Image (cartoon, helix red, strand yellow):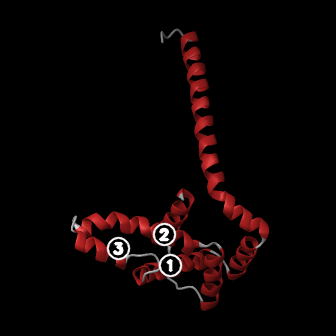
Amino acid sequence: MSRRLLTIAGALLLLVCGASAEAPSPEAMSAARKLVVTLKIADQYRALLPQLLLKLRPVIAQDRPEIERDYDAMTAPGSEIYTPALTSMIDQVAALYAQSFTIDELRRIEAFYAEPAGMKFLEKSGALAQAGVQIGQDVSLKAADELKQRLVEALRQKGHKL
């Protein structure tokens, strides 16, 4: 789930910070939308919406059971309340991709992720990213300890008392 959140947050951050003023061509948008579907970005975003709505529930319902019941019915999975946000997210991410890559690149990226190796990469990328972060933290801690020892020894050799 954290890979999904990072993917969406990164895409939206890039959209806000680096979007070009020029609108992508319809052909570029079509290729980008196809990539967004292949990457299952809408599914990732759809998975985050219930968490958002759950956080909004106490704020809106204010511990009033009658409001909570109606709120739950209005925000049930598959409800229309998700549609505008989902459509906007898909359009914005597709525009980001269309502005960031050529039509040929979009098609080649989509083709890769549509193949078994690309699908396997998508399936495993969350776990791999988490493992990579852990490896980075472990190596950094070990390197920091080793560097500290070497620096302390070097400073002691120069006559410093540590």
Are the two marked residues, 3 and 2, in contact with CB atoms closer than 8 angstroms? no
Amino acid type for the residue under numbered disc 1: Gln
Q: Residues within 10 Å of mark 3 (few under 14, many from 20)?
A: some
Q: Where is mark 2, residue-wise? A: 12
Helix or strand or loop: what does disc 3 sit on? helix
Query: Is 43 located above or below residue 103 in the figure?
Result: above
Are the two marked residues, 3 and 1, in contact with CB atoms closer than 8 angstroms? no
Q: Where is mark 3, residue-wise? A: 72
User: Spatial distance from mark 3 to mark 1, Cα to Cα?
Assistant: 28 Å
Displayed quadrant of residue 155: top right
> First in sequence: mark 2 or mark 1?
2
Are the two marked residues, 2 and 1, in contact with CB atoms closer than 8 angstroms? yes
Displayed quadrant of residue 108: bottom right
Helix or strand or loop: what does disc 2 sit on? helix
User: Spatial distance from mark 2 to mark 1, Cα to Cα?
Assistant: 8 Å
Q: Which label lies toward us, 3 or 1?
A: 3
Q: What residue appears at the point 75 percent right and 76 percent down from the top-left corner?
A: 111
Q: Nearer the viewer, residue 26 or 81?
A: 81
Q: What residue appears at the point 57 percent right and 29 percent down from the top-left corner?
A: 144
Query: Is 87 located above or below residue 149 in the figure?
Result: below
> First in sequence: mark 3 or mark 1?
3
Amino acid type for the residue under numbered disc 3: Asp
User: Spatial distance from mark 3 to mark 2, Cα to Cα?
Assistant: 28 Å
Q: Nearer the viewer, residue 26 or 137?
A: 137
Place of residue 129 in the rendered image (x, y in percent of width and height, measured from the top left): 62, 52
Q: Where is mark 1, residue-wise? A: 92
Amino acid type for the residue under numbered disc 2: Leu
